[in-house]
Image (cartoon, grey):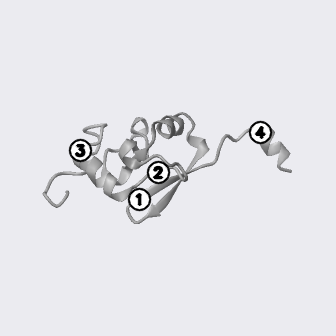
Amino acid sequence: MDADGCVLDVGRTARRATRRQRRAILTRYTRCMVDHCPMPAHLCQIDHITNWSDGGTTDLDNLGPTCQFHNRDRYRNPTHYQLHRAGKNRWGFTYLGPRSSMRAGRAR
């Protein structure tokens, strides 16, 4: 709950973040959760760390801002991103890029 007693963790009862969740997230983040992305958080979509389609909850600790590009790309290409803690109450993603067998073969 927040300081006013409003629920900030809604589990799986709702997919979209509430206004109060969004407000709390925008106090934690200034930019998109993907490292080096310059998109300001207030222009980002609120995204699930563990995707909703994979059983992720709409709880404050499982939400953060991602720009439209990274939101869709992370969903479509989850192996291209590595999750890491970016602070006590924050997450971040490092973009690893596509991994192909051809690229791995050149690394020898």
Location of the N terminus (image quadrant): bottom left
**Mark 3 and mark 1 residues within 8 Å of each other at the beta carbon:** no
Residue 21 place in picture, x, y as percent: 27, 49
Which residue corresponds to mark 4? 101
Instruction: Look at label 4 and name its amino acid.
Output: Ser
Q: CA distance from mark 3 to mark 2?
A: 19 Å
The residue at the point 39 percent across, 55 percent down is: 29
**Mark 2 and mark 1 residues within 8 Å of each other at the beta carbon:** yes
Secondary structure state at the residue bearing disc 4: helix
Of callouts 3 and 1, the N-terminal one: 3
Of callouts 4 and 2, the N-terminal one: 2
Nearer mark to the viewer, of 3 and 4: 3
Secondary structure state at the residue bearing disc 1: strand
- Whether residue 17 is visible, yes or no, is yes
* Mark identifier at residue 90: 1
Q: Up-down: is 107 above or below 55? A: below
The residue at the point 41 percent across, 59 percent down is: 90
Query: Callout 4: few (<14), some (14-19), or many (20+) C-alpha neighbours within 10 Å?
Result: few
Q: CA distance from mark 3 to mark 4?
A: 44 Å
Which residue corresponds to mark 3? 19
Query: Callout 1: few (<14), some (14-19), or many (20+) C-alpha neighbours within 10 Å?
Result: some
Residue 36 place in picture, x, y as percent: 55, 52
**Mark 4 and mark 1 residues within 8 Å of each other at the beta carbon:** no
The residue at the point 53 percent across, 36 percent down is: 73
Left or right of residue 1, residue 65 in this image: right
Query: Callout 3: few (<14), some (14-19), or many (20+) C-alpha neighbours within 10 Å?
Result: few
Of callouts 3 and 2, the N-terminal one: 3
* Mark identifier at residue 33: 2
Q: CA distance from mark 4 to mark 2?
A: 28 Å
The residue at the point 40 percent across, 47 percent down is: 65
Q: CA distance from mark 4 to mark 1?
A: 33 Å
